[in-house]
Amino acid sequence: MLPATPFYHAITDEKLQKAYFEAVQKDYLINCQEVFILQNLLFVWPETFESLHYQRPVFRIKHLKSSITDAPTTLASFFPTNTYLYGEFSFEAASLPYSYGLVQKKSLQNLGFRLVETRLHYVHTKISHLTYNAFKTRQATSSDESWLREIAANQRNDFDRHHAEPTFSQKTADAYLAQYASSALRGFCTGILVPSEPLKRAFVAYTIHKKWAVVVPQVGASQSKGAFYELLYNILLLGQQNDCKSAYANTQLENTACQKALMRLGFNYTHQTEIWAWSS
């Protein structure tokens, strides 16, 4: 059984939340208290941000053992009641045997996991070649927070793991995205770009990792046709101005509109991952 740490309790103190966001921004890592190893099968870490929102222990699987066919059929004995686990896995590495992915998926199913999202990953490696022809956008400020929260919740992406996951209600998942928008504005991300025109309601949050010279669009929503493309283009230009060599983005297998926008911007598909989840 995992130790009962203060991590499991919802934290509403704003100073503590701010400290967490600053730690994430500085280190580009989830600010976890401990890493747990379950019988050498799963390596997991606490997801503080999601635990605070969902009011339950949430863990992300950092590593899955290459062969867990002998794993127990239940994880309930390892975790407190109302725990949620999820992990993102790739089963298409060229160096792996064909049967590897099938064995891993069967093992996850035996453990009680379910597939909740198939994610496609893209990379843009020619940021320096972009012609500077910026669209009219600006950085979001604290005065934008109310409508950012509203659009994040209302213009939901039904394909993301929060909405595709039956553990969470649609209302709870919508509230998560609203909170994410607020957190991105307060420092969880490098910034949020919005259209300059007041009548255009859209945003895309992004993070610039100067250490690795990459820019990463992270989450966004739009009520205005074409605004998403314009915001993504200007984020690539921001990467160019910050000497970024590449950009990374992802979307869901079913989200063809986003896929088309990324390819139109010059992103190239790289690989596919799957997100599997388990809850007690």
Image (tube, rainbow, N blue to C red):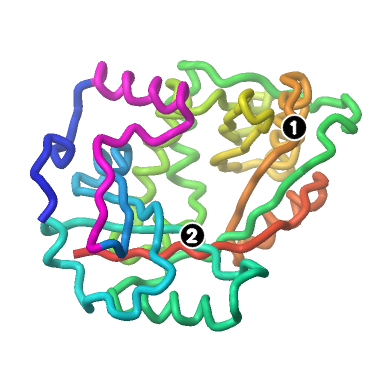
Instruction: Measure the alpha-carbon separation of dots 2 and 1.
Output: 26 Å
Sooner in the amino-acid sequence: mark 2 or mark 1: 2
Q: Quadrant of residue 220?
A: top right
Residue, x 62% and y 67% (percent of image)? Answer: 93
Task: Give the magenta-colored segment's residue range.
Answer: 14-39
Image depth: mark 2 or mark 1 in front = 1
Residue, x 51% and y 61% (percent of image)? Answer: 159
Image coordinates for residue 271, horizontal then vertical, percent: 66, 60
Residue, x 29% and y 79% (percent of image)? Answer: 70
Helix, strand or loop under label 1: helix
274 with respect to 108 (left or right): right
Identify residue type, mark 2. Asp
Task: Give yes or no for residue 128 being in the magenta stretch.
Answer: no
89 with respect to 202 (left or right): left
Residue, x 55% and y 62% (percent of image)? Answer: 273
Image coordinates for residue 188, horizontal then vertical, percent: 45, 27
Residue that label 1 marks: 236
Residue that label 2 marks: 158
As drawn, 132 above or below 108: above
